[in-house]
Amino acid sequence: MWLIIGLVAGAALLALVLWLKGRDIKVAWYEWLIGIVGLLLLLFTIQNFTGSFAELEPTAAYMFLLVTGLPALILLVVAWQLVARRQRAGS
């Protein structure tokens, strides 16, 4: 399962880079860093969520969604908004 998730994540990252280059959108290094940290935290959350359910611990699984999943989504949205706002300001 994680091999497939890794392949999908890699393909999505490649598609994102090609899409950004095609639209001539510049992304700063810190925006990449925030996005990658958010993505890694999201993958960590998915792994621990599925693992906790496999061990029949639904309370721990839902706590992982709250404690690590919510910050992961916030980081991803922050990275997206930084790029979008800088792009709008430059246009």
Image (cartoon, helix red, strand yellow):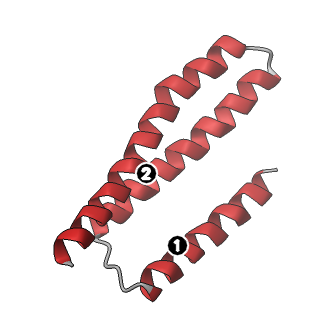
Amino acid on which the number 2 mark rests in the picture: Val
- Residue found at x 37% / y 58%: 80
Task: Looking at the image, tell me whether mark 2 or mark 1 is earlier in sequence order.
Answer: 1
Q: Residues within 10 Å of mark 2 (few under 14, many from 20)?
A: some
69 with respect to 53 (left or right): left
Q: Residue at x 74, y 29 (%)?
A: 51
Front-most of 25 and 58?
25
The quarter of the picture where residue 14 lies is bottom right
* Residue at numbered disc 1: 16
Q: Position of residue 42 (x, y in %)?
A: 55, 43
Residue 41 falls left or right of residue 46: left
In the displayed structure, 17 sits above or below 5; it is below
Residue linked to disc 2: 37
Count of numbered badges drawn on the protein: 2
Q: Position of residue 15 (x, y in %)?
A: 58, 76
Q: Quadrant of the C terminus?
A: bottom left
Tell me what residue is drawn at x 50 percent, y 80 percent.
19
As shown in the figure, which amino acid type bears the numbered disc 1?
Leu
- Residue 67, disc: none
Residue 36 image point, x, y percent: 45, 57
2 vs 1, front mark: 1
Q: Residue furthest left?
A: 89
Q: Secondary structure at mark 1?
A: helix
